[in-house]
Amino acid sequence: MRAAVLEEHGEPLVIEEVDYPEPGPDQVIVEPEACGICRSDWHAWQGDWGWVGAKAPEGQILGHEPAGIVSEVGDAVETLAEGDRVTVPFHLADGSCPHCRAGRANVCDTVIPLGFTGVAPGAFAEAFPVREADFNCVELPDDVDFTEMAGLGCRFMTAYHALADRAELRPGDRVAIHGCGGVGLSAVHIADALGAHPIAVDVREDKLERARELGAVATVNASETDDTAGEVTAIADRGADVSLDALGIEETCRNSIQSLGKTGTHVQVGLTTGAEGGEVSVPVDAMTMQEIEFHGSFGMPLVRYDELFTLIAQGTLEPGKIVGETLSLADVPETLASMDTYDTVGIPVITEF
C-alpha cells in the first residue's frame, strides 16, 4: 500500500510502498476515506517534542485526524465489524487506567499518540491499525460524512474540549483566540455557536477574514500593533473572560494571558516549537493578584463525542466550514512543508489515497 513516510526530519515526506498492516487480537485495520493535515504533523516532521518524549522517529507514517472504514478485525475485537464507518482519536488509550475509567481517556496513563510513534503508524496511508479498537474506535452517525469528520478531527474536537469543558465557556463570554490556524478557527466557530463573543488574533489578514466569516465579532492583526493584548483588552472592555493560545509560542501564550480581565481563564492548546522547547515564561505575579486561571487542554475525552455529534446533527456546529481544501496523498509532502510559512487557511483534508 502507499504511505507518506517521514524519512528525515525537516525533509519532504516520501510517498512509498509499505506493507499492509495486519491486526493484532485487540486491533482493527481502518482504511481512511479522509484525514486532516495538522500543525501537529508539522511539529513531528520538524522533530519537535523530544522534551516530552514524543519525538516522531524517522520512518514514521504520520497522520492523526482520520475517518474511514474498518477493513479487518482482530480475533478479540467484539463490537466492530468489517465495513463499519469509524473515526479514531489521536490519543489512543488503553481503556482500563483510572483516567479512562473516569471518562478522561485523553490523558490515559499509557496513551499512544496515533501517527507519532512506531507502534502506532498513522493515517497518511491507505490503511492503519488501531490499538484497543473496541475502546478507541468511535462509530460515525450516518449523517456525518468522512471529510466533515476529518475536519472535526484533532483540531475541532480539541477546541471544543478546551472551550466547553476546560474553560466552561458561557453564553455572553468574551473569548480571545490567539492564532487562526485550524484549531483557532475551530475555536472561533465553536465560541460563536455556543453564544460567546470571539475576538480573533493573527498576523495574516486572510485568516482574520476567515475568522470573521466564522463568527468573530472583532479581529486584531498582531503584525500591525505593538500591544496585541492591549488591543484585545480594549475590545473586550476590561479584558476577555476566556483566552486561548492556539499556536504555542511564547508571544501568543503571554498575549493570551495578558488579554484577560480579572478572574479570567487562559487555556493552552498550542504546543511549543523547538524555539521554546516546552518552556515559556508567564506573568505569574499578575496572574496571582488577578486570580487568573491557567488550564492545559489536550484532545477530547471519548465520552464527549456523542455531544458533538448531537450538536452537528442540530446544525449548531458545522466542522465542514473549517475545511480549507481537499487533496490527495501525493500532495501531503508539499502541503506539510507549506506550514513553515503558515500559508494554509483552514484545515486541509486528504480525500484521495
Image (cartoon, rainbow, N blue to C red):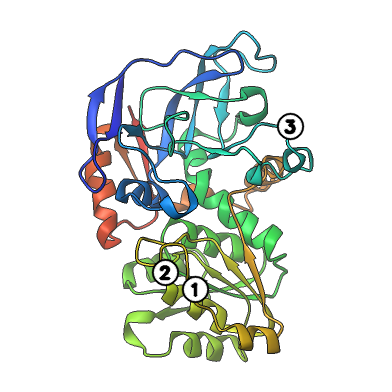
- Please say if the residues under marks 1 and 3 sit with CB atoms less than 8 Å apart: no
Helix, strand or loop at label 2? It is loop
Q: CA distance from mark 3 to mark 2?
A: 34 Å
Question: Horizontal and vertical percent for residue 14?
Answer: 22, 33
Seen at 37% across and 80% down, the residue is: 221
- Please say if the residues under marks 3 and 2 sit with CB atoms less than 8 Å apart: no
- Residue 141: tell me if it is visible: no
In the figure, 198 relative to 220: above or below?
A: above
Q: How many residues crowd mark 1 within 10 Å: few (<14), some (14–19), many (20+)?
A: many
Q: Decide which of tag 1 and tag 3 comes sooner along the chain.
A: 3
Q: How many residues crowd mark 2 within 10 Å: few (<14), some (14–19), many (20+)?
A: many
Give the residue type at disc 3. Ser
- Residue 131: tell me if it is visible: yes
Report the disc number at residue 96: 3
Question: Horizontal and vertical percent for residue 50?
Answer: 41, 51
| The image quarter in which residue 80 lies | top right
Residue picked out by circle 1: 253
Query: From the viewer's perspective, is 247 left or right of 162?
Result: left
Report the disc number at residue 249: 2
Question: Horizontal and vertical percent for residue 251?
Answer: 42, 77
In the figure, 139 relative to 318: above or below?
A: above
Q: Decide which of tag 3 and tag 2 comes sooner along the chain.
A: 3
Split into 4 quadrants, where in the image is the N terminus? top left
Split into 4 quadrants, where in the image is the C terminus? top left
Seen at 67% across and 67% down, the residue is: 195
Give the residue type at disc 2. Ile
Helix, strand or loop at label 1? It is helix
Q: CA distance from mark 1 to mark 2?
A: 6 Å
Seen at 29% across and 32% down, the residue is: 4
- Please say if the residues under marks 1 and 2 sit with CB atoms less than 8 Å apart: yes
Query: From the viewer's perspective, is 125 left or right of 305?
Result: left
Q: CA distance from mark 1 to mark 3?
A: 34 Å
